[in-house]
Amino acid sequence: MHAVVLVGGFGTRLQPLTFETPKPLLPVCNIPLLERLMTSLAHGGVTHAVLALGFKPEPFLKAFPDNRCAGVELSYAVEDRPLDTSGAIGFAAREAKINERGETFVVANGDILTDLDVAKLVAFHHSAKAEGTIHLTPVADPSQYGVVETDATGKVIRFVEKPKTGETMSRHVNGGTYIFETSALERMPGTAPLSIERETFPEMVRAGVLYAFATDDYWIDAGRPDTYVRSNVDLLSRKSIYKVTPIDASAKVDATAVITQSAIGANCVVGENAQIVRSVLMTGARVDANAVVVDSAVMGHIGAFSQITSCLIGAQGEVNSGAVLRDAKVPDPAGLT
């Protein structure tokens, strides 16, 4: 089975981490987010994935030089201009000749981490004889999302964007994984910008060919600073289909340092009496003696006796000794534009 994986975004919300590393290649417990996603897709029967890119594929070619990721064969479709979601799907599917195969295919957002069994989603899709099927996931507060309403058979009735109290009984939102028949590509020409949420899905609802399948599998959108860090922390503390390596073997962590619910990457250095709490240290990060890092992601250098909370520190980031930072980005993307 083939898949289109949407990785065309520029990861603006995760800057400065994404200045040098595309968002799908950021690590989740020392394995790229994209590889986590591919592992899930492979479990569901995907053998080939085309990455829908809005930029050059060189970082991905470097990360996966044999064009394979988690056993899935990779190819690339690079847009020469932004095509939005449906436009990107249509373009990438044609680049990979999915439109010529006449087979059911998968679409996945590249910043989602989930334990969804894609095979079950495909099975429902076929049983419903749907043209398209959306994976739904429950959320505690639907007012922050676009909610999906279905009838008893799973057919989508309507979408309610950021509903007010009492406006809908549904707590299920779009989980970012879809199943399509190739006939759906007629609605996604891939030659001009087109939104799947605002245009294609509503058109399919009117035609009565869009269904949805809800599960309570683990799910997180790792594309925001807080959720990116949380995706790492969650994976350390839950059962999952994914391999977990909390501390890379090449990292040098002082015996007096305290590591709590955190992922430590290759060649990191953590000094004496440092505290790393619910955080991510990426390849080559350095945390000096007596520094405290909480709810943060770090690529750069944290000076001695400093304290950072809910911060993103990029590869060129330097936090001076004794500094106290909260909700900061170093270097500040706003100052570099």
Image: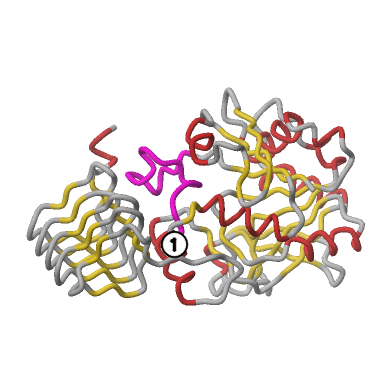
In this picture, residue 313 sits left or right of residue 228: left
Residue 274, given in percent of the width and then of the height, sits at 18, 69
Residue at the far front: name it. Answer: 249
Is 274 in front, or is 112? Answer: 274
Q: Is residue 130 placed above or below 291 in the rendered structure?
A: above
Q: In which quarter of the image is residue 124?
A: bottom right
Is 285 in front, or is 66? Answer: 66
Identify the residue position indicated by label 1 in the image. 29
- Decide whether residue 196 is among the magenta residues: no
Residue 285, given in percent of the width and then of the height, sits at 26, 53
In this picture, residue 262 sits left or right of residue 153: left
| Residue pictured at 82% horizontal, 66% vertical | 154
Is 53 in front, or is 283? Answer: 283
Residue at the far left: name it. Answer: 322
| Residue pictured at 65% horizontal, 39% vertical | 74
| Residue pictured at 49% horizontal, 52% vertical | 32
Q: Which color scheme is applied?
A: secondary structure
Q: Is residue 43 placed above or below 85 in the rendered structure?
A: below
What is the crowding at mark 1: few (fewer than 14 residues within 10 Å), some, or many (at least 20)?
many
In this picture, residue 295 sits left or right of residue 76: left
| Residue pictured at 15% horizontal, 60% vertical | 288
Residue 134, given in percent of the width and then of the height, sits at 74, 57
**Which quadrant: the C terminus?**
top left
Q: In which quarter of the image is residue 259?
A: bottom left
| Amino acid type shown at disc 1 | Cys
- Decide whether residue 15 is among the magenta residues: yes
Residue 305, given in percent of the width and then of the height, sits at 9, 64
Q: Callout 1: helix, strand or loop?
A: loop
Image: magenta residue range: 10-29
Residue at the far top: name it. Answer: 80
Q: Is residue 43 placed above or below 209 in the rendered structure?
A: below
Q: Is residue 95 placed above or below 328 in the rendered structure?
A: above
